[in-house]
């Protein structure tokens, strides 16, 4: 089976590829020659994931899954949430996003947060969604140089390391994206 993962983020692709069963050939947007910006205009994480999966299916004809992830900080009423990638502006710069978040959290000791990933699968004209959550807190400074996005400032509950300090295998096991992808994989395995 061929399945497109609707992302241009090579880090995400690498994380997910190791979780997908060998009988499924994972294709990237580049593989299907989709070089346009896929719209993400919904006001929820779920909505964006669905919009991206449906866009690829409707415009390129491939079975596809897409994810959207948000970092939800309790004291900021769930922000940056659906706007996590562009929290500090349209450049989508991870350093700017982390700097703004750390600045916004300076006045408080409540640093609890969670990462949430939703995967939307458009397969044979049916839509399914899968979600994963990883609870943790925002550190006061950056730690580690692995991962991407907010990984250097997010420490999952029960661990002494941030995602950016963790081995990818551990991050996939306990992380939001790994949990959502495992649900997707279970679903795909039941079909085959």
Image: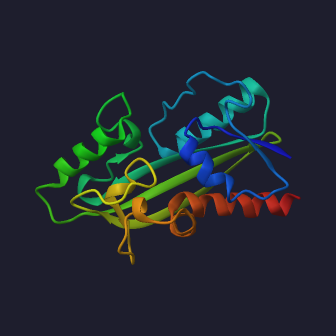
Residue 4 x, y percent position in the rendering = 73, 39
Seen from this angle, which residue lies furthest left?
107
Q: Quadrant of residue 106?
A: bottom left
Residue found 37% across the figure and 69% down from its top: 161
Q: Is residue 51 above or below residue 137?
A: above
Seen from this angle, which residue lies furthest right?
192
Compare residues 32 and 14 and report the one nearer the observer.
Answer: 14
Residue 174 x, y percent position in the rendering = 52, 69
Compare residues 146 and 64 and report the one nearer the observer.
Answer: 146
**Number of marks in picture:** 0
Residue found 44% across the figure and 55% down from its top: 146
Q: Quadrant of the C terminus?
A: bottom right
Seen from this angle, which residue lies furthest bottom?
158
Residue 72 x, y percent position in the rendering = 36, 54
Residue 14 x, y percent position in the rendering = 61, 49
Q: Quadrant of residue 169?
A: bottom right
Residue found 28% across the figure and 56% down from its top: 142
Identify the image's colour scheme: rainbow, by chain, secondary structure or one colour: rainbow
For residue 50, side relative to residue 108 (left or right): right
Residue found 36% across the figure and 41% down from its top: 94
For residue 94, side relative to residue 66 (left or right): left
Compare residues 32 and 179 and report the one nearer the observer.
Answer: 32
Q: Is residue 90 above or below residue 167?
A: above
Seen from this angle, which residue lies furthest front?
145
Q: Is residue 113 above or below residue 119?
A: below
For residue 35, side relative to residue 94 (left or right): right
């Amino acid at each position: 089976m061929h399945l497109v993962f609707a992302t241009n983020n090579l880090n995400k692709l690498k994380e997910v590829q190791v979780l997908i069963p060998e009988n499924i050939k994972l294709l990237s947007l580049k593989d299907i020659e989709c070089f346009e910006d896929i719209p993400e205009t919904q006001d929820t994480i779920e909505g964006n994931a669905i919009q991206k999966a449906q866009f690829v299916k409707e415009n390129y004809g491939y079975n596809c899954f897409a994810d959207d992830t948000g970092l939800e900080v309790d004291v900021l009423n769930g922000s940056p949430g659906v706007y996590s990638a562009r929290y500090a502006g349209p450049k989508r710069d991870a350093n700017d996003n982390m700097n703004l978040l750390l600045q916004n959290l300076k006045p408080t000791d409540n640093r609890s947060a969670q990462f949430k990933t939703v995967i939307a699968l458009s397969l044979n004209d049916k839509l399914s969604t899968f979600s994963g959550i990883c609870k943790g807190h925002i550190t006061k400074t950056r730690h580690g140089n692995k991962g991407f996005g907010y990984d250097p400032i997010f420490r999952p509950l029960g661990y002494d390391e941030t995602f950016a300090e963790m081995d990818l295998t551990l991050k996939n096991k306990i992380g939001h994206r790994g949990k959502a992808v495992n649900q997707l994989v279970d679903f795909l395995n039941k079909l085959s």
